[in-house]
Amino acid sequence: MSTTDAVTFWDGLYAARPAPTDPRPNVRLTETVESLPPGDALDLGCGNGGDALWLARRGWRVTAVDISAVAVERLTGLARSHGLDDRITAERHDLQESFPQGAFDLISAHYLHTPHDLNRAVVLRTAAHALRTGGRLLVVDHGSTAPWSWNQDPDARYPSPLEVAAGMGLDPAAWTVERAYAPRRIATGPGGRKAEVTDHVLLVRRTA
């Protein structure tokens, strides 16, 4: 799938959904980050913007990126309406082609799955190198298929968190895996539909 097709896909996906006025953050983000001191955060694939808003409310300076201009424009408006536009910068990036500038204390990549070509290992390795010493990369992937997912491939395979970590090829002298686990939760999809899903959670810390 070309970049143009990918942009059309994600713009269409977000445009077809009502724009939330106060989107909720991902639970794996809140449970992981709530005890950390605020700093500079990067939200890869910001979507509706719930994670970026939650972080900004807790004092983080957030760079939020998405391939969809619709998502980026919505988040820019939400940040302004919630009085957080001084803490959130929303940027459009195709991570296959460009990566945000800067160094970060936290980088969050939640459900960075896509039907178009994306070398996730390269993107995540680039993210790990964008961490300051002591900074953390939180990668949360789908570990199961929700009934409302755009990907209903019955043969879909979900790499484990340790497989994702291995694919990044990071030097263990400079990065360490702090957590790698697969918790379950009850998720709520469009229209309030609920289902049990599995998350694959990986937390990597830069140590040098």
Image (tube, rainbow, N blue to C red):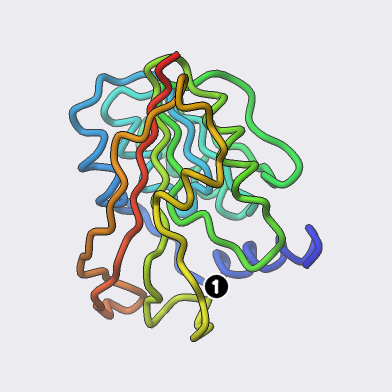
Which residue is labeled 1 in the image? 16
Would you place residue 144 above or below residue 11 in this image? below
**141 above or below 132?**
below
Where residue 45 appears, as percent x and y from the top left, is: 53, 48
Q: Pick whichever, 144 or 22, lies toward us.
A: 144
**Image position, residue 84 (x, y; %):** 39, 30
Residue at the image position 27 percent from the left and 49 percent from the top: 28
Q: Residue at x 24, y 25 (%)?
A: 36
Left or right for 152, reference 98? left
Provide the secondary structure element on which disc 1 rests: loop
Identity of the residue drawn at 34% across and 50% down: 201
Whole-percent x, y for residue 58 in the image? 26, 28
Quarter of the rendering occupied by the N terminus? bottom right
User: Could you tell me which quadrant the C terminus lies in?
Assistant: top left
Q: Nearer the viewer, residue 166 or 104?
A: 166
Q: Is residue 102 above or below residue 124?
A: above
**Residue 27 in the figure: left or right of residue 123:** left
> In which quarter of the view is residue 139 placed?
top left
**Dot 1, how many residues are within 10 Å of its Cα: few (below 14), some (14-19), or many (20+)?**
few
Asked whether, in this view, residue 130 is left or right of residue 201, the answer is right
Give the residue displayed 52% in from the left and 42% down from the top: 44
